[in-house]
Image (cartoon, helix red, strand yellow):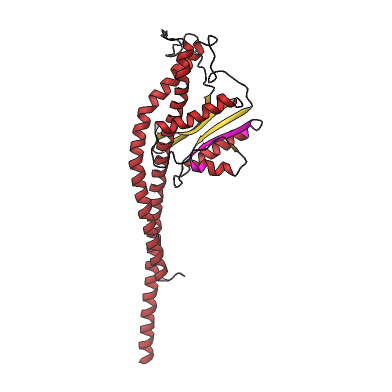
Amino acid sequence: MASLLDMRRRIKSVKNTQQITKAMKMVAAAKLKRAQDRVTAARPYALKMGEVLGGLSAKVSGEFSHPLLDARGDENYLIVLVTADKGLCGGFNANLVKATSTFMKENPEKNSEMVPVGRKGRDYFRNRSVKFVGEYVGLTGQGQVSLADARDVSDKIIRTFVDDGEIDKVFLVFTEFKTVLSQKVKIEQLLPIPRIESAEGEEEAGSEAEYIYEQPPGEIFGKLLPKQVETQIYRALLESVASEQGSRMTAMDSATKNAGELIDTLTLNMNRIRQAGITNEIIEVVSGAAAAS
């Protein structure tokens, strides 16, 4: 049985851990509020831009071609995996790694390469014979990302897709923020940019609306399509940051509660040990008095 001193040391250690997890929860909550505001502001623009460009590209199909739109084969995949740089955020990183591994297992005949964004995803797949085209670490470590960071990633992906000509499709794997308690891993095709074909009689903002072009469509799309890739990556980074902080806040809240329950259990055991010690002392005093008499 542990001694009274050992129990006190364990209780003190758990209390110190509880203070750390409580502080981490508060920091995550503060970062989450900022990240959530940025996601809320950026998401409508990114979604509408993808909808409009996808519809327009389907409408002008055949009039011009662009490397970011032209369909290729279905043999070589490039996976852009967005994970966190740090742990202690519940199953956030594990869910992303699992979804990516499942996607690769479901396509065993494909030649899959990767651009990991985040230390956790990079460290996992680096030891599993996955070829890296590039890697980005530290973009989300401070709880915020910039458009310049997204531009660096998108430029690398576009150069790899266009200049090398060996990649057929690019997929973006990230976590979409729903609520603090709910995040969803998504796998979206980033390149070539999907053309949105509208159903008959269905009015889509991008495909059914009529537009007047001041410049030729090829010139307009030549500038907008790279911007679309950059915007989607920026949105994925923002979603990932918000999801990471939400997962960390939930995980640290759970850890704080578990530490409190453990402290209560250890305190109860410590009181039992103290009571047993007092009882033994009383028995010894009574036994000694009885023997003396």
Q: Residue at x 53, y 41 (%)?
A: 122
Q: Which residues are magenta?
A: 105-120
The residue lying furthest to the front in this view is 163
Q: Residue at x 34, y 42 (%)?
A: 29
Identify the image quadrant of residue 98. Answer: top right
Q: Residue at x 41, y 24 (%)?
A: 46
Task: Find residue 252 and report its horizontal and vertical position in percent.
Answer: 40, 48
Q: Is residue 18 left or right of residue 165?
A: left
Number of numbered discs = 0
Q: Residue at x 46, y 17 (%)?
A: 53
Q: Nearer the viewer, residue 69 or 102?
A: 69
Q: Nearer the viewer, residue 58 or 164?
A: 164
Q: Is residue 95 left or right of residue 141?
A: right
* Above or below 253: residue 213: above
**Residue 71 lies within the magenta run:** no
Residue 177 in view in this figure:
no
Q: Nearer the viewer, residue 204 or 72?
A: 72
Task: Find residue 142 and report its horizontal and vertical position in percent.
Answer: 39, 42
**Residue 116 lies within the magenta run:** yes
* Above or below 72: residue 207: above
Instruction: Say which quadrant the C terminus sits in.
Output: bottom left
Task: Find residue 102 and report its horizontal and vertical position in percent.
Answer: 58, 36
Q: Nearer the viewer, residue 159 or 93?
A: 159
The residue lying furthest to the right in this view is 109
Identify the image quadrant of residue 75. Answer: top right
